[in-house]
Image: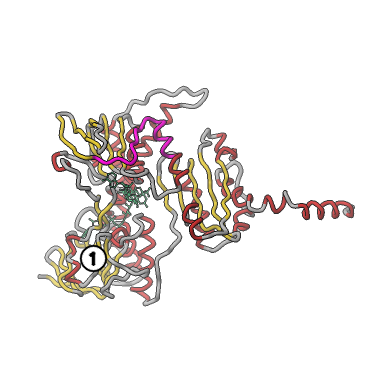
Amino acid sequence: MERISTDICIIGAGSGGLSVAAGASQMGAKVVLIEGAAMGGDCLNFGCVPSKALLAAGRVAQSNRTGTPGVAGAEPQIDFAAVKAQIAAVIGQIAPVDSQERFEGFGVQVIRAYARFVNPREVEAGGKIIRARRFVIATGSHPMIPQVPGLETIPYLTNETIFAQLERPAHLLILGGGPIAMEMAQAHRRLGCAVTVIARSKVLGRDDPEAAALVLSTLRDEGVSVLEGRNIARLRPLPDGLEAVLDDGTTLAGSHLLIATGRTPAIKALDLPAAGVAFTERGVTVGPNLRSSNRRIYAVGDVSGGLQFTHVAGAHAGVVIRQMLFGLPAKQAVIVPTVTYTDPELAQVGLTEADARKHHPNLQVLRQEFLHNDRAVTDGKTAGFLKLMLVKGRPVGVTIVGAGAGELVGLWALAMSAGLKVGALASIIAPYPTRGEISKRAAGAYFSPKLFDNIAVKRVVRLVQRFLP
Ligand SMILES: Cc1cc2nc3c(=O)[nH]c(=O)nc-3n(C[C@H](O)[C@H](O)[C@H](O)COP(=O)(O)OP(=O)(O)OC[C@H]3O[C@@H](n4cnc5c(N)ncnc54)[C@H](O)[C@@H]3O)c2cc1C
Ligand SMILES: NC(=O)c1ccc[n+]([C@@H]2O[C@H](COP(=O)([O-])OP(=O)(O)OC[C@H]3O[C@@H](n4cnc5c(N)ncnc54)[C@H](O)[C@@H]3O)[C@@H](O)[C@H]2O)c1
């Protein structure tokens, strides 16, 4: 068996593994990158990229359908297979950035095979034994498939198969109530499918309830049927699809079923016990520095058991590179913005109002409605709000729901990471008319009562006016 010796061996070429490989190799380390399936991992092939491309097609369909006063809407002609071909083209357009050729150009040795540890210092992949000074496990996650009687009799879809589904589902049943369920529900509904979401608890349950309610009501207004607090008791195949019997006895017939009930870490094939790496059902057990119980082995991205986002996996790469290449201490960032790309978008950074109230008795909550933003009015997209959680004049959390919320939250992530006071945001000059003015106005609202409802200020102004020439 061929033996390879290297500085860093990375298992998994998704968002996390590729970021580590690109950074470490370009800074001079000898890197081996092992990928068992497609380069780019979930985000490129089965996650962020295809889901956002599908949502983009749905957005165009919806805007054609609704029109705007003076511009008549009309039911769009949708060629579902062509939409899927466009999604494949979008993936193809981004794929070169994640390609084997690009990484080989950085000097990375890429092995296309599944890897498993054979001992605490070595991995086997594709008939090769790789010995490395440091390993990075970046194997991501798979859809978690719940135990539902009869599921094994249904050819169900997951995020790994739905984007290759060429025929339009007549009635898509979606099990789950997280971001995957909501994004896929809206995209499919707008592209002409009947959609029913079955969620065992409240949908988008980790988000601010008021913001989640706005997303939910929009989906319902568009015709998505959302059943909360329900489980599927059993499933059975029908000639043209499937039948789901819910726990309250309701029967639903659908043409297709999408499972979107959370994720399970991709650790099975790794033989972690052989490497002395501790793990749970959430993934590899790591400390804030992402180091596992084997001090030579780190874990990044979805498999490390924390937040499961591409930008988190990318940020993890910086944390492990600092330690592996320079021997410097580093730990995971705590301020992480997240966005659900429904229309309206739902963005969050830091604490939600409910969490902030638990931790900060002196919390101040300020709010700006999109309705009072001129750009939202001119665009006819006035549904939404920004909620700012402040403690002693510093933001501890921001929730934004509305058109373009994802583009607005970055400023607040910067403010919080840099420990800025709200005055820094209030003093920005935001171009008019942009949605960015919502952030400035929310920050300004902190000072309004101090300036406008303040008797001392009024007295000073009157006094100064008496003496000014
Ligand atoms: C439908 C959907 C939409 C999403 N949308 C967003 C979004 O809009 N924004 C966002 O930030 N996040 C989004 N995510 C989450 C995002 O895709 C993940 O957080 C991200 O891909 C995690 O990166 P990763 O590197 O940890 O894992 P992955 O990208 O999954 O990469 C892991 C790689 O490891 C490989 N691998 C696994 N086991 C082995 C092994 N033993 N040997 C060799 N290779 C192995 C896999 O084949 C895979 O290529 C979405 C996810 C889904 C499912
Ligand atoms: N816009 C984005 O950034 C984006 C989009 C999609 C996915 N993601 C990432 O992918 C992760 C996985 O997304 P997800 O939506 O699959 O998972 P999730 O864990 O966020 O949500 C799972 C949902 O399914 C429900 N559920 C679980 N078991 C169920 C069952 N048996 N019956 C009915 N409902 C059930 C849960 O109550 C929950 O609402 C997310 O947490 C996120 O990190 C991000």
Where does label 1 land, which residue? 109
Report the amino acid beneath label 1.
Answer: Gln
Q: Residue furthest left?
A: 1
Residue in the foreground of this view, choosing between 24 and 454: 454
Residue in the foreground of this view, choosing between 358 and 161: 358
> Residue 112 lies in what quarter of the image?
bottom left
Q: In the picture shown, does residue 275 fall above or below 247?
A: below
Q: Which residues are magenta?
A: 215-232
The way the protein has been coloured in the rendering is secondary structure
Is 140 left or right of 216, judged from the image as shown?
left
Q: Is residue 4 visible?
A: yes
Residue 459 in percent (x, y) is at 82, 53
Q: Residue furthest bottom?
A: 327
Q: Is residue 90 visible?
A: no
> Residue 332 lies in what quarter of the image?
bottom left
Residue 401 in percent (x, y) is at 48, 44
Is 102 left or right of 409, judged from the image as shown?
left
Q: Quadrant of the N terminus?
A: bottom left
Q: In the picture shown, does residue 293 fall above or below 248?
A: below
Residue 116 in percent (x, y) is at 17, 65
Which residue: 37% across, 60% down? 314
Q: Residue furthest front?
A: 248
Is 125 left or right of 90, judged from the image as shown?
left
> Residue 10 lies in what quarter of the image?
bottom left
Question: Is residue 219 on the magenta stretch?
Answer: yes
Q: Residues within 10 Å of mark 1 (few under 14, many from 20)?
A: many
Question: Is residue 274 on the magenta stretch?
Answer: no
Q: In the picture shown, does residue 250 fall above or below 146?
A: above
Residue 399 in percent (x, y) is at 49, 49
Q: Secondary structure at mark 1?
A: strand
